[in-house]
Amino acid sequence: DKAEAHKVKVVVEEEEKIVSVQAEEIRIIRKEAQAELDKAMPILEGAIAALDLIDKDKVNELKAMKANPPALVQVTLQGVACLLGEKTDWDNIKRTILSRTDFISALKDYKRDDVPPSCTKNLQKLIKTNPDWISENVGKQSVAAKPICQWCFAILEYSKVVKEVEPKKMHLKNMNDKLAEAEGKLKAKQDELNRELMKVKKLEDQFDEARNEKERLDNEAMLTRDRLRRAEQLTSGLSDEEIRWKESAEVFGEKTRQLVGDVLVSAASISYYGPFTGVYREELVNSWLEKCREYEVPFSSDYSLQETMGNPVEIRDWSLQGLPSDSVSVDNGILVSRGTRFPLMIDPQTQAFRWIRNKEKSLMIIKMTDKDLEKKVEHTTKSGIPLLIEDIGESLDPTLDSVLLRKVPLDKNFRFYITTKMTNPHYLPEICIRVTLINFTVTQEGLEEQLLADVVKKEKPDVEKTKNKLIMTMAANQKKLKELEDQILQLLAESSDNILDDEVLINTLGESKESSILIKEKVEESIKTKQAIEETRAQYKLVAERGSILYFVIADLALIDPMY
């Protein structure tokens, strides 16, 4: 059908060229004929316009002339008789022409395009026999006859032009007939072409519809394949994640249940056991846990303040900043960072002082004896600079009460620390309720644990590096897993009706699975590393015990009277 339409289109284009050529020829002939007619038209229009000057009185003047009117007037009216096909004698002119009431109108409405040849022939004879018959001469004899004379000559001239143009008109008519016939054929061909084009258009529409349907089916097939692939990924991912999520749900459920006792004991520890040594703290915690068991308050079987309130990465940073890595010192660090009241640290060995100095980069250190104490305190509270007052006695300056009780505006970055080197200070209750009292005094057991950590770090640095690296990796992976789980929950909440169309969600599930596997491997690795560290620590435990004993023996020598 498209080929057939092309054939018809070629024929139509040829026909259009022929018709266009014929139309151009007709236009040229029409233009030439009109140009020749236009030459005679001014004369004719001027003569007709002159007839408008003849009124009824002038016509009556012509009628009133006697039997022998002026010669040129009579010739003029004979010319009119010639054109009207009447007899040219004067009596007949008066009777048949001048007597007409529509004489002037008849001249204006004369059929100039169809003047009989006999009329023009008689008029030409009249002109030959009367060579002085011109409008100027006629006007001298009769003003009314002059425009009539002009009209006669104009009609004669116009009829000559019409005769010359007539063949062109006939040719033009024939050309118009041929053009009409050609246009008719062209119209038929164009209609045929339009019908063929409609067929082609219909077929093209059908083709486009079929192609669109094919594309739709292809897209649907591709979507189905993608959904199958994602379904496999989802099934594979969820099959493994289901186990982890069930285990995590059980662990979280148990931890949530135990959270009541853990937080209760942690709050009590932060509030009350700061002033005591490590051994007595342990006794306090055990007594609290026993009460929790007695009153059926759930708590973790392996409860520790470090596990409940500590952050492994933060604790590692404290160690790098100089805080000893034994459990008592780590618990003291938690008391400093988690307590709501500002810490007052009993620090005879200045371990807390060194840790705080390294921890706070822009720390301001002052003493109670400083003259401008009040100004410095006010400056730090407003500018957010951490402040440490060292070496206090058993009393505090009353000007610090407003800061300790937070009665003045404090910058959000402001942190306040107080230390004393007294080994066994006695603080009044009004001081104890204003601060978190924390005992950083080194005991024999505590020093033994510190020395053990330092010896292992010195003798086996690779073990310590592995431990630190593992802590950082575990923290990063746990953070990433938490972010992925949050993202999965968000994507599930925002997901469309078909979860298989959400490729981001499927990929996130896959990434979560990979992260959980990696974390599981790291957890297993951390257990092995912890075991290796404990084995290494056991090897050097005797060294730490001897070092601790040696320190306290030397320290106790100061208690012997000098005379001995």
Image (cartoon, rainbow, N blue to C red):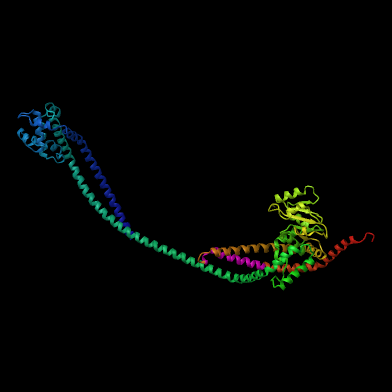
Magenta highlight: main SS: helix
Q: Is residue 173 left or right of residue 407?
A: left
The residue at the point 41 percent across, 63 percent down is: 211
- Report which quarter residue 335 is drawn in: bottom right
Q: Quadrant of the N terminus?
A: bottom left
Q: Is residue 30 left or right of residue 498?
A: left
Q: Residue 32 at x, y = what percent?
A: 23, 40
Magenta residue check for 342: no
Q: Quadrant of the C terminus?
A: bottom right
> Which region of the structure is painted magenta?
499-521
Q: Residue furthest right?
A: 563
Query: Toward the viewer: 276 or 143?
Result: 276
Q: Is residue 304 left or right of residue 426?
A: left
Q: Residue 535 at x, y = what percent?
A: 77, 69
Query: Toward the viewer: 120 or 95?
Result: 95
Q: Residue 152 at x, y = what percent?
A: 13, 34
